[in-house]
Image: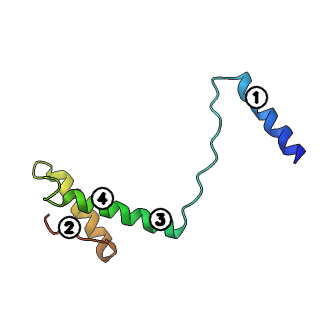
Amino acid sequence: MEKSHREAEAAQRQYAADPNRDPTAPPPSPMTPVKYARLIHQMFSLVGYAIDSDNVDLADHPDLVDAIRELYARAGTAAPRAPEDY
């Protein structure tokens, strides 16, 4: 424990000596399958809400509608909710 404390202090002094150097960030940890599934479900929910004509009118954004159609087509039956209006 004392060794790791000394190493942390040395690293802190190194960054203090060179203020232009950005500290290196640890690599992101991989998502668990549950977190990933929840994230995908939330994304589809937001996209489904946005494309619903009762919420947002995308008539002047045909490129966005095409992208959403492709997203749902690629997801197939895995998409939580297929929008009816597009």
At 29% from the left edge and 74% from the top edge, which residue is drawn? 76
Give me the C-alpha separation between circle 4 and circle 1: 44 Å
The location of residue 63, given as percent across then percent down, is 18, 52
- Quick check: marks 4 and 2 in contact, CB under 8 Å? no
For label 3, the residue is: 36
Q: Measured along the vertical axis of the image, is residue 3 above or below residue 66?
A: above
Tell me what residue is drawn at x 87 percent, y 48 percent.
1
Residue under pointer 4:
46
Height in image: 55 above or below 6? below
* Viewer-side residue, 8 vs 67: 8
Q: Secondary structure at mark 4?
A: helix
Residue type at mark 2? Pro
Which disc number belongs to residue 14? 1
Q: Which marked residue is nearer to the observer: mark 4 or mark 1?
A: 4
Residue 53, quarter of picture: bottom left
In the image: residue 32, left or right of residue 63: right
| Residue type for callout 1 | Gln
Q: Give the mark nearer the N terminus: 4 vs 1.
A: 1
For image coordinates 89% across by 44% down, the residue present is 2
Amino acid on which disc 3 is placed: Tyr
Instruction: Name the residue beneath numbered marker 2.
Output: 83
